[in-house]
Amino acid sequence: MSVTRRLARPRDDRWIAGVCSGLGRRFGLSSGVVRLIFVISCLLPGPQFIIYLVLWALLPNE
């Protein structure tokens, strides 16, 4: 039986808004890895910042 983790922004492991930390906890990754993936993805064209802002607004606090 597995425990499903809720997607939320933690209060203890935030740098800016806690979105990367929340995604890391949800998918079982280190928050540093998710932050690195986000920074590298920002070098590519796409709506990364808009997605980050939307997740910041929509994800609840823990």
Image: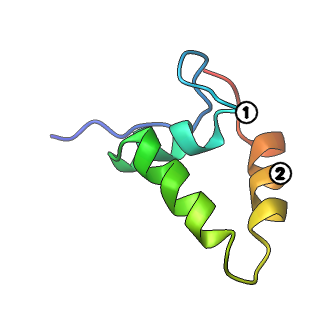
| Color theme of the render | rainbow
Do residues under tags 2 and 1 come within 8 Å of each other at their CB atoms? no
Image vertical order of residue 42 relative to residue 57, above or below: below
Distance between mark 2 and mark 1 Cα atoms: 9 Å
Residue 18 appears at what percent x and percent y?
Answer: 64, 33
The numbered dot on residue 53 is 2
* Residue at horizontal 57 percent and vertical 67 percent from the top: 40
Residue 50's image quarter? bottom right
Name the N-terminal-most of marks 2 and 1.
1
* Residue at horizontal 74 percent and vertical 49 percent from the top: 55
Label 1: state its secondary structure. loop
Image vertical order of residue 30 relative to residue 38, above or below: above
Report which residue position mark 1 lands on. Answer: 17
* Residue at horizontal 69 percent and vertical 69 percent from the top: 42
* Residue at horizontal 57 percent and vertical 44 percent from the top: 20
Q: How many marks?
A: 2
